[in-house]
Image (tube, helix red, strand yellow):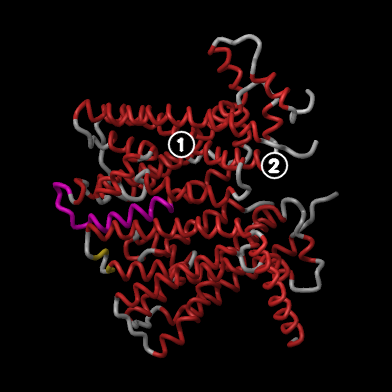
Amino acid sequence: MTGTVWRHVRLAFFLGGVGLHRLSVYRVDFLLGAGAFLVRVGLQTAVVGLVFRQVPAVDGWTYHEVLFLLGFSLLPRGLDHLFTDQLWELGRKLVQRGEFYRCLIRPVNPLFSLLSERFFHPDGLGELAVGAVLVGWSGSELGLRLTPVQWLAAPFLVLCGALIHTSVKLLFASLSFWTVTSLPSMYAASQVSEFAAYPLDIYHPSLRAVLTWVLPFAFTSYVPCGYLLTGATGRVIWLPLVTAAAVAVALAVWRRGINAYEMTGS
Amino acid sequence: MNGPRTGGALRRVREHPTPLPPAARARRYLPFATGGLQSLLQYRSTFVTTGITAAAGAAITVFLWRAVYADAPPGGGPGGFTSESITTYLLVAQVLQILHANRVDDEVAAEVYRGDVAVMLVRPVSYPVMRFFACLPVVAANAVLVGVPVLVLFALLVPLTTPRPVDVVLFAVSTALSVLLAFLVNLLTGMTGFVTTNTWGVRMVKQSVVAFFAGQLVPLALMPGPLSALASALPFRGMVDGPLTLLLGRYDGVAGAVDVLARQIGWAAGLTLLAGVLWRASLSRLEVLGG
């Protein structure tokens, strides 16, 4: 058992190195992707700036608090992008073109085999960097002083958020085992995850309920930020439970999907 | 039909022996429009997911700005907007964006990348005009099957302003022009496929820049002076802010309305010219491998 885990860890390091190597080969592609990402986040920050030109606070959130939330929301998203973007390929074409079998015939866990085809997606690095800068800058503007417990909890909060993102992506990508391609639904789910970049208080109650209980993106940024900014623990203690539930549901659907998978002929 | 890669074949195609009357020329492109519609209707579930995506996008901006205008005086808050009119602005902006998502940039870039464009070039039609006709059913289907349901959904949730009939007519004209502008912008974006293979990054930049400077996320009236001046000088304004200025009656008399439409027409003409020139220039350096 420990032998298998150890082998997967070593493989992950090796394949991660391959992924990094790829970045240095396709340098222009990397720069274009990272540049495009900077433009996108830059304009998103500009929109928040323009909103706060009109009012000092939105539903009790100040300018720097919203920027903190926006920046923090990029951290779990970036961590998730870094390792699991191959799931988009599953939803897009692996089942449709009958290529998925290659993940089943390798002597490792099929999910690991699929994800390891592309570690270190460059977008993820851009998101992590921009997110960290935004969080650091707005945190110092707010005069935020984290307690030692909060410092210890922060990486765990990011990790749980990333696992929630991954679970939703895995769930919708696995639908392709039945529907052949699930790209549009993955795209819709990723658009819904954009809600997490802003305070939930501004949304319609029905939308807030969806983001908390159906697709729990609230737990990727709004809930952790509430804890880091105010120290309130009422909601954040549910985070591990929600993460575990999301991962369990997604893995169950994935397993059923592999069992239902039938390769296209020829 | 012999080798599409020889310059001679291309030139022969472009110099059509007998110029056809415009009506006959337009009829030649109709099959592309009906063909586009047929392939679209093969993937009907796409409309549902496009709708969810659009509704989610609209909800973010609508709720963000509604929170700003929650305490605005009834006479109008910043920029002369009321809570209802800013909601209408942002919601209709999202619907316009659905009409502009004509996938021309994806398809042109992909066909240039794969070299399929060569096959298109041997046909006795103009490729950009063919693309325009092929995208019309996409626009119409998106308007009816996605735009209207999203509008109705939000009308049930949040209060909106009712526009004057004359403004609705002006808006309709302006919207038609905005669809043309969106086609041209996407055509030019797709044509970057002639110079780079990573059109994904280019398309993402285009999407963010257009959404911002068209006024889809923040109305131009709420931008600070220099930024608003820059946005007014760019063609993207005619895609969202222009039509909505007319819909909400935020213009000064006839001259104001004419100004909005004239700018749109001017940019449409300018971009058509630009696309035409660049298209010719790109073809002369196009190389397609394989056979």
Q: Which residues are magenta?
A: B56-76
Q: In the rendered view, tell whether residue A194 sits above or below residue A61.
A: above
| Closer mark to the observer between disc 1 and disc 2 | 2
On the rendered structure, is B69 left or right of A3?
A: left
On the rendered structure, is B66 left or right of B128?
A: left
Q: Which chain does the residue under circle 1 lie in?
A: B
Q: Give the quarter of the image for residue B152.
A: top left
Query: Can you identify the residue that label 1 sits on?
Result: B182
Task: Identify which amino acid the numbered label 2 is placed on.
Answer: Arg
Distance between mark 1 and mark 2 Cα atoms: 24 Å
Secondary element at image label 1: helix
- Any part of residue B165 in sight: no
Task: Identify which amino acid the numbered label 1 is placed on.
Answer: Ala
* Residue farthest along the bottom direction in this orientation: A148
Q: Give the quarter of the image for residue B45.
A: top right
Which residue does the image show at 35% across and 62% down from the upper left? A205
Query: Can you identify the residue that label 2 sits on?
Result: B114
Secondary element at image label 2: helix
Residue A241 covered by magenta stretch: no
Which residue does the image show at 73% across and 23% down from the upper left? B9
Residue B69 covered by magenta stretch: yes
Which residue does the image show at 79% across and 61% down from the upper left? A101
Q: Percent position (x, y) of residue A47?
A: 34, 56
| Residue count near mark 2 (Cα–Cα under 10 Å), binned few <14, some 14–19, many ≥20 | few
